Image (cartoon, rainbow, N blue to C red):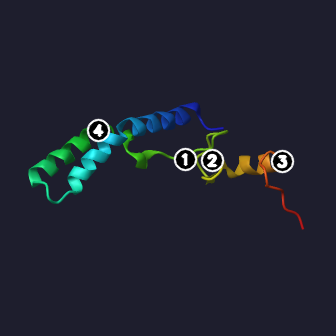
Amino acid sequence: MAKKSMVNREVKRAKLVKQYAGRRADLKTVIEDQSKPMEERFNATLKLAKLPRNSSAVRIHNRCQLTGRPHAYYRKLKLSRIMLRELASFGQIPGMVKSSW
């Protein structure tokens, strides 16, 4: 089980990303638009830099929904490998059976 503080930090980051997504997208379109004057693009870069670091989507780290484990994460199921194996063994994941031969 991951520390509660780490899980809460990720939740806080996800909330910030959602809150600032529109603003960041608008500023990035201004920065990438070559037809805009250089000064306007530079000002947009400065405004983007003033936004909170945790509002960037790159800073979000995937974690298991049940344990909070950050490693060995399956995106499709949002689970770590350990919980995936455990749930599959108990037959709680539809269509997944423990293999034996």
**Label 1 residue SS:** loop
Residue closest to the eye, 7 or 79: 79
Residues under labels 1 and 3: Cα distance?
24 Å
The extreme bottom residue here reads: 101
- The residue type indicated by label 4 comes to Leu
Q: Which residue is mark 4?
A: 51
**Disc 3 to disc 2: CB gap under 8 Å:** no
Numbered label attached to residue 43: none
Q: Residue at label 2? A: 78
Q: Secondary structure at mark 4?
A: loop
> Is residue 41 positioned above or below 99 on the image?
above
Between discs 2 and 1, the one toward the N terminus: 1
Q: Callout 2 environment at 10 Å: few (<14), some (14 to 19), or many (20+)?
A: some
Labelled disc at residue 91: 3
Q: Position of residue 37 (x, y in %)?
A: 10, 54
* Mark nearer the N terminus (1 vs 3): 1
Q: Position of residue 97 (x, y in %)?
A: 83, 56
Image depth: mark 3 or mark 4 in front: 3
- Residue at horizontal 53%, vertical 36%? 6
Q: Is residue 100 above or below residue 70?
A: below
Lower position in the chain sequence, tag 3 or tag 2: 2
At label 1, which amino acid type do we have? Asn
Tell me: 53 left or right of 65: left
User: Does residue 85 appear left or right of residue 79 in this picture?
Assistant: right
Looking at the rendering, in which quadrant would you find the C terminus? Answer: bottom right
Q: Is residue 89 left or right of residue 39?
A: right
| Image disc number at residue 62 | 1
Q: CA distance from mark 4 to mark 1?
A: 22 Å
Q: Amino acid at mark 3?
A: Gly
Q: Which tag, 2 or 4, sits closer to the chain's start?
A: 4
Q: What separation in Å lies between label 2 and label 1 (alpha carbons)?
A: 8 Å
